[in-house]
Amino acid sequence: MHSTDRIVVDALIVGAGFAGMYMLHKLRAAGIGATVVEAGSGVGGTWYWNRYPGARVDIQSLEYSFGFDEQLEQDWRWSERYAPQAELLRYADHVADRFDLRRDMRFGVRVTAAHWHEAAQRWHVETDVGARYDCRYLILATGCLSIPTDVTFPGIEDFQGPVYRTSRWPHEGVDFAGQRVGIIGTGSSAIQSIPIIAGQAEHLTVFQRTPNYSMPAHNGPIPDEDFQAWASDPRGYRARSRDTGGGFQNEARPDALAMATAPDDIRTELERRWAWGGFRILGAFADSGIDPEANRIVHDFIAEKIRAQVADPEVAALLTPKDHPFGTKRPCVDTGYYATFNRPNVALVDLHAAPITTFNAGGIATTARQHDFDAIVLATGFDAMTGAIDRIDLRGIDGLQIKDHWAEGPRTYLGLMVAGFPNMFTITGPGSPSVLTNMINSIEQHVEWIAQCLAWLGQRQQASIEASAEAEADWCRHVTEAVTPTLLPQANSWYMGANVPGKPRMFMPYAGGLNTYTEICRQVVAKGYEGFVVKNGDAVLSDSRAFTSHPPMPDIPAALLPIIIERLTAAGLMPAAE
Ligand code: NAP
């Protein structure tokens, strides 16, 4: 097909979640023509797809909302501390209407291939509906948790009832009244949906392989003091959120060590944070993410809370995490999860003791017995961070395929660009703080960086930009350096790609914190886009290959230095002491 058959745009944005929506808005403001293509039939991304019962955000809504437009911020009122999925989707629709985004969006269109044409310095993009695009810039706003894993079970097609995936929930909803339901998985999606399904169904059986840590949301109306803290100075409030490692306010105490705190004071602090709810407990002690003994203290506290909520001690023991330190898998935030196991119509099956052997017409057989169901729910997770990108036939310079470039794990520069893939940007891509943070603040930071970059390129006769291989290698090393001192690599988490058979093991997000990362990105720009090669055809406009904007060493409490040095040395990231 000739390139004239293609729809020509400056920028093609893939995905109409919060990232794609804001990217479009920002590019329009910069006078850059952009089109969004989206596989779903509406905006909202995560909140469009994940309609399972109980789905709600678990960062406070006051912080999990766009901050780029003051009037939008003033006009929108969240009904609850942690907004439910339907309200988040209404918010996405409201933003799309308010900024008239839909006129440049094409729904029901999935990108299947994108090939870089070096001579033309453009991307040629194919879709599953036949529409073809020719664009200068390709922006992947495809989401970190958008493609479910391919998990399946022998005999699944023989089951006579419906099988639902939490991340592909029917738009019309599901009524479980009077039904026997089985759910597989105990991650965040399951932990949110189990209490609701248990309330509807005649009986619910939860199949658990690995127990997770979950903290109470204490959801409800937004407490007056929280609202006032925000309303008295929304700009300042947002700035403070962004100036944190996680992109949300957590009262993190970088100097407080559990190992140096008296037991009574530890309890007081943990109780206070548990009562506040959500992720606040993560910020209690700086050593809990590094020192196994400090982590154990938090573990023991949560284990005690599980025992206090679950009447049957054996069930409480089964629900208590054993195989990974607290915080090394993404912790969950729940509303009544543990207490659900006190209901007479709920049973917990430990898949370690009795693994699933097969699905069959009646339900699920484990090595111990048959479980009959009317419906089954798979809450089995996502091919995180790379899944949506891997599924596109993406080819850069000389036909380099992303699958090959990422054969040993996703390599990027700043989580924003990939060497060999000019003019292709990833929003909250692997190698950026993304899933370790409040996504919306990370999205805003990325979108603003990319929009600024494209405006800068536009001033240079529409030049092309590419991450240098050297900077990419340097950044990957820094991503490893940032996570190695922590306990995070110790879990078989989806952060590590461990939930997808055959996926390379590599800690994918950047653990150095959103504030640190934002400063690095700012410095990279201030140094004339260091680490990037900028060209116009054959003419090289700038070529600064090295990445030198490493953050200064954070102030680390002295007591933690031996562990950190030991881990960095063992990983070959620090020379061994003589
Ligand atoms: P997940 O955390 O990966 O949990 C998947 C669950 O399915 C795990 O318990 C896993 O067990 C189990 N599982 C997978 N394959 C299985 C198999 N073959 N047999 C038995 N069990 C199996 O997925 P998720 O719950 O969808 O959550 C993913 C992420 O999405 C979260 O960590 C969070 O970042 C995000 N999320 C956020 C929200 C929110 O913000 N409100 C809500 C939901 C999800 P193993 O652990 O043993 O593999």
Image: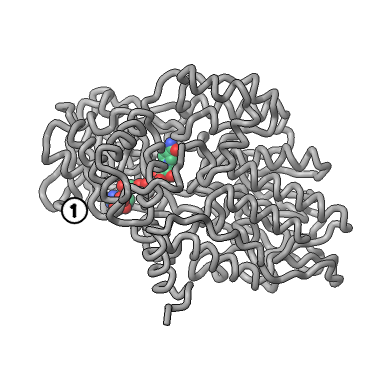
The reply to whether residue 168 is visible in this rendering is no
Locate residue 112 relative to residue 258 in the image: left or right: right
Q: Horizontal and vertical percent for residue 519?
A: 64, 52
In the figure, residue 308 lies in which quadrant?
top left
User: Looking at the figure, which quarter contains the N terminus?
Assistant: bottom right
Q: Describe residue 215's horizontal placement relative to residue 427 as left or right.
A: left
Q: How is the image coloured?
A: one colour
Above or below, comparing residue 386 to residue 308 in the picture: below
Q: How many marks?
A: 1
Q: Say which residue label 1 marks.
A: 352
| Residue drawn at (39%, 68%) of the image | 567
Is residue 263 positioned above or below 404 on the image? above
Viewer-proximal residue among 107 and 194: 194
Question: Measured along the vertical axis of the image, is residue 61 above or below residue 352?
Answer: above
Looking at the image, which residue is at 49% across and 23% down?
Answer: 226
Label 1: element kind: loop
What kind of residue is marked 1? His
Counting from the top left corner in percent of width and height, residue 109 is at 62, 44
Front residue of 309 and 24: 309
**Residue 431 on image: x %, y %:** 55, 58
Circle 1 Cα neighbour tier, 10 Å, few/some/many (<14 / 14–19 / ≥20): few
153 horizontally vs 139: left or right: left
Is residue 483 positioned above or below 378 on the image?
Answer: below
Residue at 40 percent across and 38 percent down: it is 279
| Image location of residue 71, percent across then percent down | 70, 23
Q: In which quadrant is the C terminus drawn?
A: bottom left
Q: Is residue 446 visible?
A: yes
